[in-house]
Amino acid sequence: MSHAQNAKLSLIGLGKNFGSVPAVVGVDLALQPGEFVSLLGPSGCGKTTTLRMIAGFMKPTAGSIALDGATISDPGNVVPPEKRGMAMIFQSYAIWPNMTVGENVAFGLKLRKLGTAVITERVNRILDTVQLRHLKDRYPAELSGGQQQRVALARAIVIEPEVLLLDEPLSNLDANLREEMRSEIRRLHDAFRITTVYVTHDQAEAMVTSDRIVVMNHGRIDQVDDPVSLYNRPRTRFVAGFIGRTNFLDGRVDGDRIVFPGFTVPKDSAPDYAALVGEASFSVRPQTIEIADQRSDDAGWWIEGRIGERAYLGEYWEYVIRLNGSDLRLRVTTPPTTIHEPDRAVWVRIDPARIARVPGPATEGRPS
């Protein structure tokens, strides 16, 4: 990956081993000034280790980190965290219980020896932005979890850091509050345009907040993309399965056809069909599949099956379709008003324009 000359933050071949165990391997990433990038992946994928190296809490085993073109970390030297001009927000918020909201937010400005009038003006302005001005004289114990999180955000943003680092900041909040706070984080980012690195295992959080998402798997980057491209054009099976839910159709090319378990389709109807040799595997999102009582003239892949289990989830129905002549099961979601009875014979239609080609189960590896 080429590193843009004007990148705010660059990770170049970054690696970290714990003993002989690689936790982060060959990570290349360039963030533009004001960009919001999430590191997304399951526990143990290396995202928090990467963040801690960016913050200066850990020394890399390989590669380097540069801020505005100047190296701040490599295996020989690490600029300490307090000299990086960065601010970090942890899962636990870490706001001081013995200080009021106003004192918490002013803390970093006092360390920078700013004048009292300047500090008061900046603290009031940021508290207005996070809608906490009326709680300026309260103590953290009197605040809700969401309000405490807003204080932590205000305290980090008020010092106008070069880079803002967030480590799973919403994981301690309940679901409704998480939803509200992820929108709040994006709103604050749009207001201040601070270059931001956000670590999360929650794909919805990453989708709502980020300009680009870095999906990590076993210490490596699987894919870096904007949320829409990542969802609609995953480049690996891992990304397809981790970002949202999906069905995998695994078949083989046989002449001018693709043979799947229980059905075949013309090869030239598949996406990227010219590149298909041997294995042919696709990611098919549940909401892109249609269920019909009978086959129509609409183009697409038509397959006969039977309704298996179903579940009503309020915003949609989820069905499992058992395909005739194979063990294949397809998960399909429909609007809440589209109701199909269990064990009924149906047709399903897959629109090849809405599916994504992915590596097969045997060849899944790094994207080329």
Image: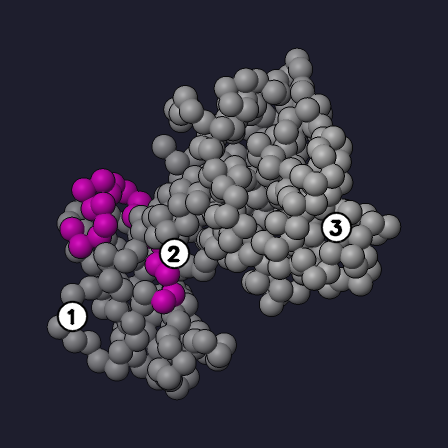
Task: Select label 1 or label 3 by which is in front.
Answer: 3
**Could you give the CA–CA distance between mark 3 and mark 2, rounded to whole angstroms?**
52 Å
The relative height of residue 318 versus residue 185 in the rendered view (above or below) is: below
Q: Amino acid at mark 1?
A: Asp
Q: Is residue 246 visible?
A: yes
Q: Point out residue 167 in the picture as x, y percentages from the top left corner.
A: 64, 44
327 or 176: nearer the viewer: 176
Spatial separation of the CA atoms under disc 2 and disc 1? 23 Å
Q: Amino acid at mark 3?
A: Gly
Q: Quadrant of residue 139?
A: bottom right
Q: Which residues are magenta?
A: 268-287
Mark 1–mark 3 Cα distance, whole angstroms, equals: 63 Å
Q: Amino acid at mark 2?
A: Phe
Give the numbered dot on residue 298.
1
Question: Which residue position holds label 2?
Answer: 248
Query: Which quadrant of the figure contains the N terminus?
Result: top left
Q: Residue at x 61, y 49 (%)?
A: 125
- Label 3, on which residue? 102
- The residue depicted at 37 percent of the width and 43 percent of the height is 235
Q: Estimate how packed mark 1 is, as few (under 14), some (14 to 19) or many (20 or more) residues with alpha carbons within 10 Å.
A: few
Instruction: Tell me the SS state at disc 1.
Output: loop
